[in-house]
Image (spheres, grey):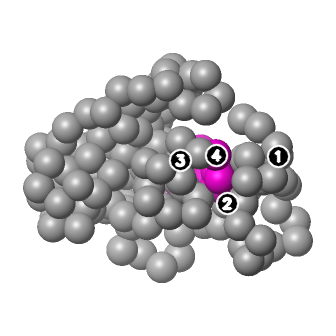
Amino acid sequence: MTEPGERLRTARCGCGDLSVVTRGEPLDIYACACVTCRARTGSAFSYAGLFRESAITIAGPFRLWRHQAESGRALENAFCPSCGAGVFFRTAAWPDLVGVAAGCFAEQDFPKPRRLYWAARRPGWLCLPADTPLIDTQ
């Protein structure tokens, strides 16, 4: 249930078949340049918000890819079976949280990452705000 004044955001895949509605602000926001995140996003890094499982509503079909992240933790990525876009993920490291890909939100005001994991693996052209902590592992 949505509380008065609580922020709602909707993340969608490319074709719109899979969506995640989030309630409230993310508990954490981060970027990651590890090999796993680069491969699963097809980009130079991932950028995601973490929400409590109870603060999201998932609608539409999705498939799961279960694998081990570079950190050694179990990771479960959910993607649209029609367009292939990765929309959300779960990891054993954060059992009650769901990560939602920031790029799947239409809103342009999604908060900036609070840190960059695997900073040594980021591309040299990636410029971050000066106050963003750079962490070499996760």
Label 4: element kind? loop
Answer whether labels 3 and 4 touch (C-beta < 8 Å): yes
- Name which of mark 2 and mark 1 comes first in the sequence: 2
Q: Nearer the viewer, mark 2 or mark 4?
A: 4
Q: Residue 135 carries which label?
A: 1
Frontmost residue, 130 versus 40: 40
Label 2: element kind? loop
- Name which of mark 1 and mark 4 comes first in the sequence: 4
* Label 2 environment density (alpha carbons within 10 Å; few <14, some 14–19, many ≥20): some
- Seen at 53% across and 69% down, the residue is 110
Q: Nearer the viewer, mark 2 or mark 1?
A: 1
The amino acid beneath tag 4 is Cys
Q: Label 2: which residue?
A: 113
- Seen at 42% across and 26% down, the residue is 67
Quadrant location of the C terminus in the rendered image: top right
Magenta residues (range): 25-34
* Label 1 environment density (alpha carbons within 10 Å; few <14, some 14–19, many ≥20): few
**Structural distance between the alpha carbons of marks 3 and 4:** 5 Å
Residue 70 at x, y percent in the picture: 61, 32
Q: Label 3: which residue?
A: 37
The amino acid beneath tag 3 is Cys
Frontmost residue, 63 versus 130: 63
**Structural distance between the alpha carbons of marks 2 and 3:** 15 Å
* Label 3 environment density (alpha carbons within 10 Å; few <14, some 14–19, many ≥20): some
